[in-house]
Image (cartoon, coloured by chain):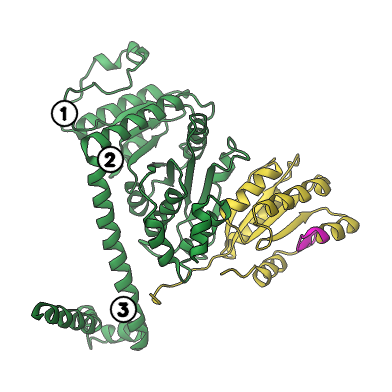
Chain colours: A yellow, B green
Amino acid sequence: MSADQEQRTIRCLVAKVGLDGHDRGAHVISRAFRDAGFEVIYSGLHRAPEEIVQATVQEDVDVLGISILSGAHDTLVPDIIEGLKSYDAFDDTLVLVGGIIPDDDEAELKELGVAEVFGPGASMEQMIAYVRENVPERE
Amino acid sequence: MSGLIDDLLAGKHRALARVISNIEDRRPGYRELVSELHQHTGSADVIGVTGSPGSGKSTLVDKMAATYRERGLTVGIIAIDPSSPFTGGAILGDRIRMGSNIGDMDVFVRSMSARGSLGGLSTATTDAVKALDAFGKDKIIIETVGAGQNEIDIVKTADTVMVLVPPGSGDDVQMLKAGILEIGDIFVVNKADRKGANRTVQQLREMLEYNRGGIPESGGHHGAGAMEQVDGLQLEAETETDRWRAEIVETVAKTGEGVDELLDVLESHASHIERSGEREEHVRARYAEEIRTLVREDVNELLAEELTVRGGMDAYVEAVVERETDPYAVSDELIEPLAECVRTQRESREQQ
């Protein structure tokens, strides 16, 4: 029946991956996303790439935000993207990376399929607007 | 859309996840999806878990899932957290505590928020349970904070209801009086390694006795020796077998202590309701409730549409404030065409 009201809510997974204990940023972003009306699933610290893949697939999130400050993005991010592909979950998930990422690496990550990289100084408004504009269309 | 169902039945996790999203978002076509799912349901055991914030629900559910996996069973988990009534946003943190099943896709964890209107959450949860059931999960666990009627309603849809009680505060046991004591089939005193656990078990046992209309035995149980009996936690076995007597189990979710025993008690409850016919009864009551809720929501939405077309709520409120009309009259006015139509159709059916 057409009377059903669709209730689309943007779902995000904020993920801390690898041996990196700096979660202040991930917390602040989770709160900001929540206040923007998103549903935020927070992974907790020290997650393995396969754990992030599992959560992304099962939770069917629109956005996967990976926070990495350890410098290990070159190994961890490709692992996650490969995992997503193996479950057909890559194409309709917006993958974002936040943290300290050198410019050269940023280009590489984007080539792999990361939609955007947010470094120090990126504002909440900017990130929320980006998510709203780029959230994948689903049927 | 039904390609999605085929994929789900074929065991594709992504399809299961997407079906649940469609259900949650009420995307066009979700009703047909749930209708199709219904044919494939009815084989899973559904366990509802509730308890106050911080009682260790997520940690315990995580350990339960791991133990079920050791027993060769597959598990689906729906973890429900509240959402902000202002922005609709939510932080769903139950996954943080669920680290025992990394990389094991046969434990399917889904976080849901209490979005939408009253009744909406229980509908979405019931439908999501159907998706997990149709997917072939053996055990489905619904986890939610026991904070209100809404949550209690959700948990009540489960075959077995588990209530977590943290030790050490009499107030928590007091809280149980408000409706939760009646719905619990199994009471779990989690964090049983903490001080005060024995006392909490004792208080619980007394309250359960009162609840049955019995008078709790005094004396005997208070002795230090009472807790040393191996199955001293089970309430006195009664010879009457037709009624389940709520059991109390002690666990330490963090270390997994007592989880095996808990699953055994869950198993015995499952076979009890099977034997006594309670499951059958419960299933029927659940479907009745589901139909009632759906009818209520559908009529509600239809009339909300009508209300908008007729100038919106504000205009009606204004008229009521001005004493030009009253809420009953407004309701009558809105429902009249629907009632008229239903009556006419009924009469024409009866004449045939």
Q: Is residue A98 left or right of residue B174?
A: right
Q: Is residue B241 left or right of residue B229?
A: left
Q: Is residue B61 above or below residue A131?
A: above
Q: Given the image, on which type of amino acid does mark 2 rest?
A: Lys
Work out whether mark 1 precedes mark 2 in sequence or the reverse, and give the earlier one. 2
Q: Which residue is mark 3?
A: B303
Q: Given the image, on which type of amino acid does mark 1 rest?
A: Gly
The answer as to whether the residues below labels 1 and 2 share one chain is yes
Disc 2, SS: loop
Q: Given the image, on which type of amino acid does mark 3 rest?
A: Leu
- Residue B346, given in percent of the width and then of the height, sits at 15, 78
| Res. B126 image quadrant | bottom left
Number of marks in the rendered image: 3
Q: Chain of mark 1?
A: B
- Residue B5, given in percent of the width and then of the height, sits at 48, 59
Q: Which residue is mark 1?
A: B214
Q: Is residue A123 above or below residue B82?
A: below
Distance (Cα) linking label 2 and label 3: 38 Å
Q: Which residue is mark 2?
A: B177
Q: Is residue B311 above or below residue B260?
A: below
Work out whether mark 2 precedes mark 3 in sequence or the reverse, and give the earlier one. 2
- Residue B42, given in percent of the width and then of the height, sits at 35, 48
The answer as to whether the residues below labels 1 and 3 share one chain is yes
Span highlighted in magenta in the image: A111-122
In this rendering, does residue A27 appear at all? no
- Residue B147, given in percent of the width and then of the height, sits at 39, 48
Q: Nearer the viewer, mark 1 or mark 2?
A: 1
